[in-house]
Image: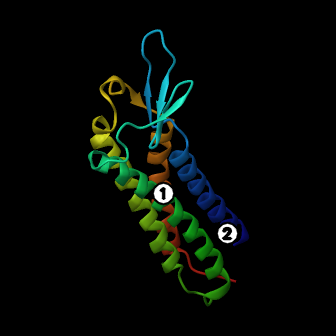
Amino acid sequence: MLIILAFIILFHLAAAILLFVATIHNAWWLVSPAGLDVIYTDLWYSCNSTCYPVWNSHTADAAYLQAVQATMILATILCCVSFFVFILQLFRIKQGERFIFTAIIQLLASLCVMIAVAIYTAQKNSFHVKSLQEGSYGSSYILAWVSFPMTLIGGIMYLVLRKRK
């Protein structure tokens, strides 16, 4: 039982770390202009040797970008909260009960990640100026997609899991 508990905690922490890196790191979109440095764009800044805010990110025209920002932050927060709820439930629930509350929070985190990445995929051209639209997805975008099934599997795992001695 102790080995299973350690695996669950490590799996949950790995998902949380992926969410943190995907949200914070500046590689959601990569543009490689000929003869120039690679430009990395994330949810807040575009950077090559210097960083500048994403164009019009504070206006109503960038509502899709703001939705991606909000749902990724919410997913990260929910994933961390579900970890702490899991630790609390380890000591509070009775033997044989399920970790339903932890599972619900983790599944909500998974839903938020999926919404954020789906919006980014569908609306990526509305976020970027014309010179940055010809690029490719970066490592943070891929990490966000990887963290979606990890949080989903974690939520399902908590639904199935029962507390034992």
Q: What residue is shown with label 2?
A: 5
Looking at marks 1 and 2 on the same chain, the residue that comes earlier in the sequence is marked by 2
Residue at x-position 66% and y-position 67%? 4
- Mark 2 element type: helix
Q: Nearer the viewer, residue 124 or 118?
A: 124
CA distance for labels 1 and 2: 27 Å
User: Where in the figure is residue 98, as x and y percent of width and height?
Assistant: 53, 82
Residue placed farthest to the right in the image? 2
Give the colouring mode of the picture: rainbow
Asked whether 142 or 72 is in front, the reply is 72
Residue that numbered label 1 is attached to: 73
Q: Which mark is residue 52?
A: none
Q: Quadrant of residue 80?
A: bottom right
Front label number (1 vs 2): 1
Is residue 15 depicted above or below 41 in this figure? below
Q: Is residue 116 left or right of residue 36?
A: left
For the residue labelled by badge 1, is the local secondary structure a helix, a strand or a loop?
Answer: helix
Looking at the rendered image, the quarter that the C terminus falls into is: bottom right
Q: Quadrant of residue 88?
A: bottom right
Q: Position of residue 57 (x, y in %)?
A: 37, 44
Question: Of the residues shown, which amino acid type is indicated by label 2?
Answer: Leu
* Foreground of the two, 65 or 53: 53
- Direction top: furthest residue: 35
Residue 22 in picture, x, y percent from top left: 52, 46
Residue 39: x percent and y percent? 48, 25
Q: Residue at x 42, y 16 (%)?
A: 33
User: In the rendered image, which quarter contains the N terminus?
Assistant: bottom right
- Given contact means CB atoms under 8 Å apart, are the residues at marks 1 and 2 in contact? no
**Residue type, mark 1 in image:** Ile
